[in-house]
Amino acid sequence: MYNKTTKRYYFMAPIHHDDEVFRQKRRPKNPIKFKITLNEEQKEAKAKILNNTVTLLAGSAGSGKTLLACQIALEKLFMREIDKIVITRPTVSKEEIGFLPGDLREKMDPWVQPIYQNMFALYDKEKIEKYISDGAIEIVPVSFMRGRTFLDSVVIVDEAQNVTHEQMQMIVTRIGLRSQMIICGDDHQVDLKSKRDSGFRFLYSAARRIKNMLGISLKTNHRDAIVEDLINLYDEAEKQGLNLGTSGSSNKRK
């Protein structure tokens, strides 16, 4: 900072974001009101997620896992508990993304639309878009995460069942101080050559062995009842060894 009187430059002391007094002064006085209320299962899961650094959030199609992750992240952002929400999910390779038209956000739009839809369902669309344009909500493809460290952030990893072991190891080691990571996945929607290639599946089974890491499964389905019946149908067929294709692409569920 330049002082016109003394004609000297002074370096201001950096603001320490872990200063709780500073954060409390920035927080809104009234609680955040979302357009959708969490059900009891989601509320219980939320309480557990808030007490852990990394959470593996499993659930079938329509269980509300992405909605829950978005609600937690938005609440922390609005309450000034974090500085940024980082959203990532497996897409095409870094080289293939380069050939797509537009900037990085425009390139990623087709893959992150489900997350945007959940955020818009929870809160005012214009305000969410303002956070996105300001960079407070950042979209980062998995292939662009190497070398990054995310401080004071909530990192949401969506469709994590299609993240390989190598990618998962790289992702979880990006988390920095005062940050949380919520990794959402569905074992029924693995599009890799084999379910054994899923980094989410492995990490979920090993979560208990790591301090401050937790695996949670949501059971309640928020879509039409036929969705749950169809999921059970395919599960039973898989248990019986029926050939439904070599990858999840043949029985993919959005």
Image: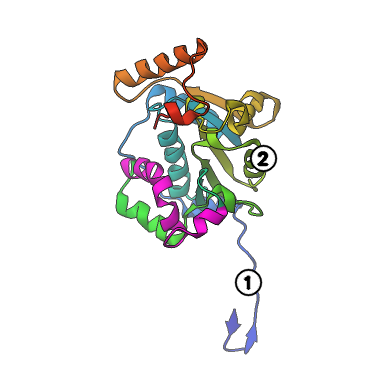
Q: Say few, some or many: other residues with alpha carbon within 10 Å of mark 2 (under 14 / 14 to 19 / 20 or more).
A: few
Q: Is residue 166 above or below residue 195?
A: below
Q: Main secondary structure of the magenta part?
A: helix
Identify residue for label 2.
166
Point 41% across, 42% down: residue: 115
User: Can residue 62 be seen from the camera position used here?
Assistant: yes
**In-front residue for pair 106/233:** 233
Magenta segment: does it hold 8?
Answer: no
**In-front residue for pair 230/159:** 230
Point 45% across, 58% down: residue: 100
**In-front residue for pair 86/187:** 187
Magenta segment: does it hold 101?
Answer: yes
Is 1 left or right of 38, judged from the image as shown?
A: right
What is the total number of numbered labels drawn onto the structure image? 2
Quarter of the picture containing the C terminus is top left
User: Can residue 29 be seen from the camera position used here?
Assistant: no
Identify residue for label 1.
12
The magenta segment is 94-121
Q: Is residue 144 above or below residue 120?
A: below
Point 54% across, 35% down: residue: 162
Image spot of residue 185 (x, y percent):
51, 31
Q: Secondary structure at mark 2?
A: helix
Q: Please give the label number shown on residue 99.
A: none
Quarter of the picture containing the N terminus is bottom right
How far apart, in angstroms, are the residues tagged by discs 2 and 1?
41 Å
Coloured how?
A: rainbow
